[in-house]
Image (cartoon, helix red, strand yellow):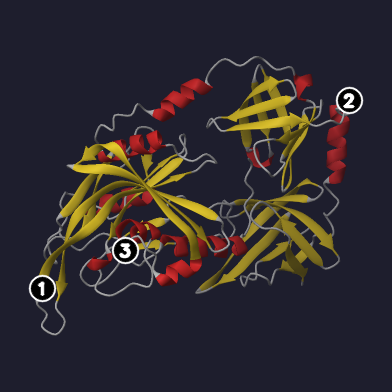
Amino acid sequence: MRTNKILAAVLAAAVTASMTACSGADESNNEVSTSESTTSSAIKTTSADKDTTTATTTTAADITAPITDVSDADMVKVYYGWGGSEDEAKYTAEIFCPEGAVFSENTLENYAEYGSVMTATVDDEVNEYSASSVTHWHRDAYSSEPTAYPIIAQLYFDGEIDAETAAENSGCSQKVTPLGFKWNGYDVILIETTYTFMDYGEQTDVFVGVEYDLDYWKAEEGTGTISDLTTKALFGFDVYSYGWDDLTQDQCAWIAGELFGVDSGVTDPFTASSEDASEEVADIDTTDLLGTWIDLTSDWEDTYFFDNGGYGSYTSGFEYTFTYSIEGNVLTVFYAEDDIDVFTATLDGNTLILVDEFSYEQRFSKATEEAPADENKADTEEENEEDTISYADTILGTWTENDTGYYETFTFYADGTGHYSYEAEGGSYECGFTYEFFRSDYIDIYYDDGDVGGFQIVIDGDTMTIRNEYVWDLPYTRQ
């Protein structure tokens, strides 16, 4: 899909709230400490950075010297607990990068500087997953009762939910599956924690790792006497799927084995699925594509439309126009801003199957209406050119939104340039841009800082309403 960048302040607030609430406790006190922060800033951007965890290293002496070249790093050292005294970092692990994945930029930067990290994140764009190292402690390890625990730890260790967290979550359940192999003598397990968070529907957190005995210390109140203690803890990885399909048990086991650097006993399930998807597919004639195709794989009723002039559109909430070509069984779709989708296409009667370069499959049913009459490509281009001037005059001037609290402002000049600004806590931001109409009601914006944005517009008097996949009917008022 083409991605058009635009401020998504309303969405950003919702995502940030969801991440903060779902991630649970602030796992920090004077005796046992880690530091993680989740941030989401969506000013003038289309998607959150996948690396949303900022790792803070310990003050203990580094166990390994800083590496000098992290570009090809395939292993990092991770702290996952403290020893019997404040200065002894007892628990460390070597985490390996799975085949085909990469360590996040943040992980590599911290490791290059300190020679160790407290959180290591790997991303695999092809197999569509990420995994971040994480430690969950039993509540005994806290010096005082935190306001909330991560749900996984509450269920696994105690079988009950903290009252405050329970008020925001419901339907919490947990499935624990031994994966049949060990790491450092510990049995590796898969923990799937399912819950309903506020209005966001049912969610499942996937953790794969081990339970171990955590040695920690506490200072006795009043005397300051330090006691060395032991309780239960979990160390492993929160695993997230980028795609619509959940990760399978074999995929989680293989990922964990790769990360821990041990044999999971599972053959690479991603390679196997890629080989299955690479079977020969019959060629498709262009005329077979003509008409409207409705998505069968979701409830959204997304549609593709193809005409015989090489033009088409994809509708998902709002419409994207494109040109396309098909050679053999490869369908290539060209959007604005040089965005391209490439599919392997298969026709099975009135069913069109599209498989993208990441092996994600969509199935479309042919709509009952007849394919459109032949159109001359030159005539179509001329009509499109005429359409693009519909809002060229009425959009000129300055427009400001007041709903999000950012007071985002666009100023459009007649020469195709403009000025963009917004206000935020601690300061403001502004930059110039150029713009052009992709079609009569869709504008593309090229910001001076290198970002590219786009949105559908409707202008009614002194109100301009914009829409894209990140904001829906956000009003701006002419100044």
**Amino acid found under the numbered disc labelled 2:** Asp
**Earlier along the polypeptide chain: callout 3 or callout 2?**
3
Residue 315 lies, with reference to residue 312, above or below; the image says below
Asked if the residues shown at circle 3 and circle 1 are in contact, with their CB atoms under 8 angstroms apart, the answer is no
Label 3: which secondary element: loop
Label 1: which secondary element: strand
* Disc 2/disc 1 C-alpha distance (Å): 84 Å
Residue 240 lies, with reference to residue 25, above or below; the image says above
**Which residue corresponds to mark 3?**
35
Residue drawn at x 82%, y 46% is 388
Residue 303 position by quadrant? top right
- Residue 435 shows in the view: yes
How many marks can you see? 3
Q: What percent of the width, then of the height, locates residue 201? A: 56, 56
- Horizontally, is 138 left or right of 294 in the view? left
Q: What percent of the width, then of the height, locates residue 288? A: 77, 20
* Disc 3/disc 2 C-alpha distance (Å): 62 Å
**Amino acid found under the numbered disc labelled 3:** Ser
Image quadrant in which the C terminus is located = bottom right
**Which residue corresponds to mark 1?**
226
**Amino acid found under the numbered disc labelled 1:** Ile
Asked if the residues shown at circle 3 and circle 2 are in contact, with their CB atoms under 8 angstroms apart, the answer is no
Residue 316 position by quadrant? top right
The mark lying in front, picked from 3 and 1, is: 1
- Residue 68 shows in the view: no
Residue drawn at x 66%, y 51% is 469
**Which residue corresponds to mark 2?**
374
Q: What percent of the width, then of the height, locates residue 427? A: 52, 73
Q: Residues within 10 Å of mark 2 (few under 14, many from 20)?
A: few
Q: What percent of the width, then of the height, locates residue 412? A: 74, 60
Q: Residues within 10 Å of mark 3 (few under 14, many from 20)?
A: some
